[in-house]
Amino acid sequence: MRDEMDESFTAALRELLIEQVSAEGRARSRVRRPGRWSASLGLLATLLAGASGVAAAAVVVISSALPGSQRVTALSAPLTVGGAGTQTVQLNQRPPGANAIYFELSCLTPGTFTFADGAGLTCNDQADVADTLEHPATGTIVLGAGDADATITAAHGDRWRLTLFYASATTTPWKINASGQTYGTPNPNGVPDLVAAIATNGQSGYVYASQLDGPQPTTPTEAATWSPAPRTITVYESDGKTPIGHFVVGH
């Protein structure tokens, strides 16, 4: 039987579809995490703040309907800063219970902007810049003991805009179907066997993670000119067996 999916689940997936980290997917801005899937994959953040704009005790829900997604509780007011090149953004005193910094990152110029944990945002041109201004990259940075800042590394003169606040972040577990396959959304723990996606017919379902990474270049020469062709893969119900539509990778 297919899991019931509420309207918020579908709305979240319609806004942010599955994309490939290693290929083009959505060739615009994206958060990168080396060796892991992008923090932006399948994430939808909604800041539930009061009219004052103060986010303390507000809740940021990041795809909470999806197994494996994060639930983030804001523990401080948001801080928005703009900068250029490499800078360290210092937050105020870390509140009790904060184990992460939640961020929204936009490019103001083309460039690559990287956090200390390896997450990063790349804008190749002005179209990418406009895209991130409308849809900032979002995610969380895990805090170590005593941490109270976030450092962005960028080339001299490359400009960025960052909104961040202290948060308590927890990751929900992936679900497991009758075949023993995990399903849900990618998160810092890795990628489930079946990854949430919206089919071209609008149906909500899952694609096999193993099918998202298509053929890869085998030589440096190939890599220099690599442009993977779009591929169509099947979208299944959470059982991984019942097809409900198709998903285009690399379009």
Image (cartoon, grey):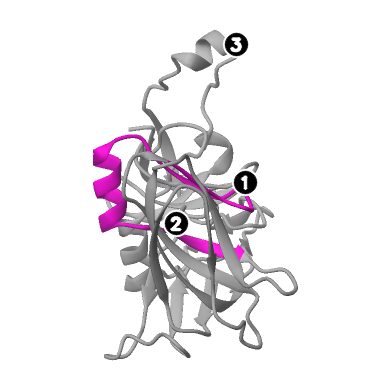
- Tell me the SS state at disc 1: loop
Q: Which residue is drawn at 56% across and 42% down?
A: 209
Q: In which quarter of the image is the C terminus?
A: top left
Q: Earlier in the sequence, mark 1 or mark 2?
A: 1
User: Which class describes the residues within 10 Å of circle 2: few (<14), some (14-19), or many (20+)?
Assistant: many
Residue at image x 62%, y 59%? Answer: 177
Tell me which corner region of the image, top left, top right, bottom left or bottom right, holds residue 169: bottom right
Q: Position of residue 151 (x, y in %)?
A: 57, 57
**Closest to the observer, 97 or 191:** 97
Amino acid carrying mark 2 in the image: Gly
Q: Where is residue 249 in the image (x, y as percent from the top left)?
A: 40, 35
Residue in the foreground of this view, choosing between 152 and 66: 152
In the shown orientation, is residue 213 left or right of residue 24? right
Which range is magenta?
112-141
- Label drawn at residue 36: 1
Inspect the magenta stretch and tell me whether residue 122 lies in it. yes
In the picture of the structure, the residue carrying the numbered disc 2 is 42
Residue denoted by label 3: 219
Q: Quadrant of residue 219?
A: top right
Q: Distance between the residues labelled 2 and 3?
A: 31 Å
Kind of residue sitting beneath label 1: Arg
Cα separation, mark 1 vs mark 2, equals: 14 Å
Looking at the image, can residue 81 be seen?
yes
